[in-house]
Image (tube, rainbow, N blue to C red):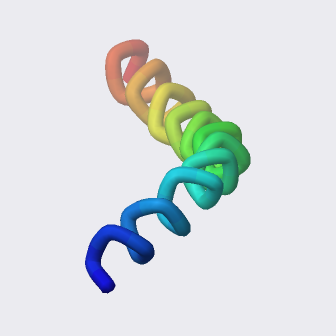
Amino acid sequence: MADTDKEVLMPHSTAPAIDLPELDFDDMEVMSVRDGGSCG
């Protein structure tokens, strides 16, 4: 059963790829705050 779950996770691996961009957005916000902090 675990083997089947693993196989289902593989195709799901493509979903995380969409999550990556979302993380980038968060990183951008963090970078902006970091830049402001450095300048401030």
Q: Identify whether 13 is placed above or below 9.
A: above
18 displayed left or right of 11: right
Q: Position of residue 23 (x, y in %)?
A: 55, 45
- Image quarter hosting the C terminus: top left
Q: Residue at x 41, y 75 (%)?
A: 5
Give the vertical position of 35 relative to 18 (above or below).
Answer: above
When asked about the image quadrant of residue 15, the answer is: bottom right
Q: Is residue 32 left or right of residue 34?
A: right
Residue at screen point 60% across, 32% down = 28
* Quarter the N terminus occupies: bottom left
Asked whether 17 or 38 is in front, the reply is 17
Q: Position of residue 17 (x, y in %)?
A: 64, 41
* Viewer-closest of 8 and 13: 8
Looking at the picture, how far across and down is residue 33, in whole percent? 47, 36
Q: How many numbered marks have been drawn onto this rendered protein structure?
A: 0
The residue that appears at 33% across and 17% down in the rendered structure is: 38
Who is closer to the viewer here, 16 or 12? 12
* x 46%, y 38%: residue: 30
Q: Where on the picture, by quarter, is residue 37? A: top left
Q: Is residue 29 left or right of residue 33?
A: right
> In the image, residue 26 lies at what x, y percent?
56, 46
- Is 27 left, or right, of 17 in this rendering? left
Residue at the farthest top position:
39
